[in-house]
Image: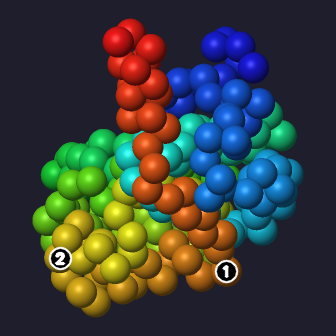
Amino acid sequence: MNAASRPPSFPGDKSLRAFDFHVNPNIDPATIHTLATCEWVKKGQPLCLIGDSGTGKSHLLIALGTEAAMKGYRVRSTLATKLVNELVEAADDKVLAKTVARYGRVDLLCIDELGYMELDRHGAELLFQVLTEREEKNSVAIASNESFSGWTRTFTDPRLCAAIVDRLTFAGNIIETGTDSYRLAQTRARAEQAS
């Protein structure tokens, strides 16, 4: 897929063909290739990619989003903090309902870096509105470096945290990418070759 045909919201050009499954044995190629058929998007199911930094979560998030876009689905990709900031601004400008509806209409919403930053209660509630708008209608795919049990640091209200986890996991796919950073391994290998 070239840059001209890539949906403008993707932060980079990542494909499944470019993903090295040999580097991360935690990721089952058959599972990912099944997800690439986009049947889960057709059914409005969620996808959670959970694992440490450098384990391939963002690459897979973008690649699977790209697969969905190539199959004709409307896809939007954003960072969690960017989405929450946009929702806060929309609420301040009295256009929140319109913004939530816009995010509700796309077939697949890809949210990267969920769990990296603590969200205040207002921001978490706004994100919850988007997830509720999409629930069991349109798919959400998220990438997080934090296991679900650690999300209470991001979503400080325990009940709201539980409701968000429920929205993102019900009838969904959960892929755990592990803890071994590909980037760190590459950096170490280059350092060893240089010495």
In three-dimensional space, the C-alpha distance between marks 1 and 2, rounded to whole angstroms, equals 25 Å
Q: Which mark is residue 171?
A: 1
Residue type pointed to by label 2: Thr
Residue type pointed to by label 1: Ala
Task: Determine if residue 73 is in view.
Answer: yes
Q: Nearer the viewer, residue 93 or 125?
A: 125
Secondary structure beneath dot 1 equals loop
Secondary structure beneath dot 2 equals loop
- Residue 38, by quadrant, is bottom right
Residue beneath label 2, please? 156
Q: Where residue 139 appears, x then y in whole percent?
A: 63, 62
Marks 1,2: beta carbons within 8 A? no
Q: Where residue 18 appears, x then y in whole percent?
A: 70, 28
Going from N to C along the chain, the mark reached first, 1 or 2, is 2
- State which quarter of the image contains the N terminus: top right
Task: Check the image and report above or below for 87 versus 82.
Answer: below
Q: Which mark is residue 58?
A: none
Furthest residue in direction bottom, as rendered? 159
- State which quarter of the image contains the C terminus: top left
Q: Where residue 151 appears, x then y in whole percent?
A: 30, 72
Q: Where residue 173 appears, x then y in whole percent?
A: 66, 70
Check disc 1: other Cα within 10 Å, few if <14, some if 14-19, many if 20+.
some
Task: Residue at 54%, 30% (x, y): give it.
Answer: 10
Q: In this image, 106 relative to 156: left or right?
A: right
Check disc 2: other Cα within 10 Å, few if <14, some if 14-19, many if 20+.
some
Task: Residue at 69%, 41% (x, y): give it.
Answer: 22
Q: In this image, 178 relative to 4: left or right?
A: left
Task: Check the image and report above or below for 8 versus 182.
Answer: above
Task: Residue at 38%, 46% (x, y): give it.
Answer: 53
Q: Nearer the viewer, residue 22 or 13?
A: 22
Q: Nearer the viewer, residue 172 or 182?
A: 182
